[in-house]
Image (spheres, grey):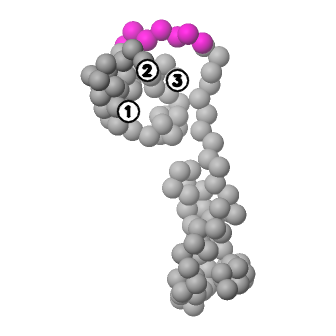
C-alpha cells in the first residue's frame, strides 16, 4: 500500500482485528465484498474482479498431528500411553479430530528413541 498514510494503515489494522478470523467469516458465507466492507469500514468498495469465490481449506493431516505428538517428547508421550492409552488431537483451525490408539502412540514413541 504505497500511497497509504500511517492513519490508513492503523485503521485497516484495527478493522482486521475487529473483524475477527477470516475462517469464521467464510463459515458465515460472507462474500469477498462483505468481508472487504467489514474489514475496511468502507461501504463504497468497488468490485474490480468478480470471479473470485473465497474458500477455506485447512492443510492439517494425521502426519502433522503425529509430528506434534513426537515434539512433546518421550516422557510426555510415555505418560499419555500409561495414563490414557490413547490420544485425541483437534486441529485449532478446522476442528478436525485425529485419534491415536495405544499401538500408534507406541510406534511414535519408537521414533523418538
Q: Position of residue 66 (x, y in %)?
A: 65, 69
Determine which residue is flagged by label 2: 1
Q: Mark 3 and mark 2 in contact? Answer it, CB < 8 Å.
A: no
Which type of secondary structure does the marked residue at label 1 adopt?
helix
Circle 1 crowding by C-alpha within 10 Å: few under 14, some 14–19, many from 20: some
Look at the picture and state if 1 lies above or below 77.
above
Determine which residue is flagged by label 3: 31
Q: Is residue 110 left or right of residue 13?
A: right
Give me the C-alpha separation between circle 3 and circle 1: 16 Å
Q: Give whichever of 83, 29 is nearer the camera.
A: 83
Q: Give whichever of 75, 26 is nearer the camera.
A: 75
Which labelled disc corresponds to residue 16? 1
Q: Residue at x 31, y 32 (%)?
A: 14
Q: Position of residue 63 (x, y in %)?
A: 70, 63
Q: Position of residue 80 (x, y in %)?
A: 55, 83
Residue 113 is inside the magenta segment: no
Amino acid at each position: 500500500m504505497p500511497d497509504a498514510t500511517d492513519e490508513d494503515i492503523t485503521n485497516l489494522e484495527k478493522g482486521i482485528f475487529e473483524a475477527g478470523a477470516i475462517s469464521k467469516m467464510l463459515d458465515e458465507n460472507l462474500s469477498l465484498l462483505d468481508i472487504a466492507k467489514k474489514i475496511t469500514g468502507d461501504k463504497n468498495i468497488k468490485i474490480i474482479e468478480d470471479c473470485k469465490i473465497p474458500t477455506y481449506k485447512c492443510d492439517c493431516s494425521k502426519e502433522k498431528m503425529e509430528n506434534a505428538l513426537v515434539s512433546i517428547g518421550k516422557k510426555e508421550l510415555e505418560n499419555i500411553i500409561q495414563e490414557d492409552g490413547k490420544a485425541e488431537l483437534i486441529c485449532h483451525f478446522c476442528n478436525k479430530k485425529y485419534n491415536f490408539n495405544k499401538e500408534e502412540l507406541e510406534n511414535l514413541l519408537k521414533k523418538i528413541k
